[in-house]
Image: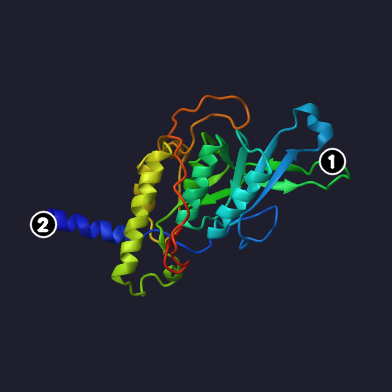
Amino acid sequence: MKGCFLGVLVLMGAFILAPVNESSVAKNSLANDASAPMRFELLSEGPAEQCGRQCRTWISATGSITDGTVHEFELFANKFDLRGATLVVNSEGGSVLAAQAIGRIIRSLGMTTSVGTTTLLPSILGDAQRATLSPHADCESMCPFMLLGGVRRHVPAEAQVMVHQIWLGGKRKGALAASYTAEELTLVQHDIGTLASYTIEMGGDIKLIETALRIPPWEPLYKLSVDELRDMRITNVNQLFEADTPIALGTVPASKGPLSNRTAAQAPRD
């Protein structure tokens, strides 16, 4: 009887994750369009006269994580040498499967991940695009799992990292009144399993999944504290750009192949 009760709890937990395969949004100082798919830009710190030879570079990743984001990131990675580069994210989340695929690419390139808002500065002819980086940004839903892909991971104290359950993309609104098929429940259960496996693979802690599963889509997202970010190993270094040895490392996995053939309405999204 106890086993049956636990099974029901797991099934309920599968229901209460975020949308499984539809685009989420991200606040974007770069594009000012929260509904835009994630875009990537390689930027240099500015103004140049202030930082001189110490100007830092980073990749801004702003917007929602869609299935198409994986291909866009692959194209971007082929265009630039991103090995060991720093990726700064500002996102409201998105596709469960896409976030994991991007996280694995990030890990294979030995990148650093962080949370921040990028603001472009007026361009000067002949100079690289300059920008400023603010720690005031959000990383929601599947975004924290994408962050786990970094070998070095840093979340500034001013940033907000928030989680909730994954859910079927087409049924997040009105989740309580919607009906669900056995196939849909199976898809959600499967994606919870893959997300848990991915979290451990990346060196994260299963407490991240446990915490997310407590927050249904009709409730406000749960903000992780600084201590929780450390405890769940989302943050594993003390400083973003300065040299710092990671506290914990996950494996460097081989490519898991292409995303499944599910439609956006079927697959769970964050």
Q: Which residue is mark 1?
A: 127
Give how far across and how far down residue 267 sits, in percent: 42, 63
Is residue 161 or residue 114 the one in the foreground? Answer: 114
Q: Quadrant of residue 198?
A: top left
**Which label belongs to residue 102?**
none
For the residue marked with disc 2, what is the amino acid? Answer: Met
Tell whether 181 sits left or right of 133: left
In this rendering, the count of numbered labels is: 2
Please indicate, yes or no, whether residue 58 appears anywhere in the rendered image.
yes
The answer to whether 163 appears left or right of 14 in the picture is right
In the displayed structure, 179 sits above or below 10; it is below
Q: Residue at x 87, y 44 (%)?
A: 124
Tell me where residue 135 sits by quadrant: top right
Q: Position of residue 206 (x, y in %)?
A: 35, 42
- Which three-letter amino acid code belongs to the residue tagged 1? Asp
Dot 2 alpha-carbon crowd within 10 angstroms: few under 14, some 14 to 19, many 20 or more: few
Residue 26 vertical position relative to residue 218 in the rendered view, above or below: above
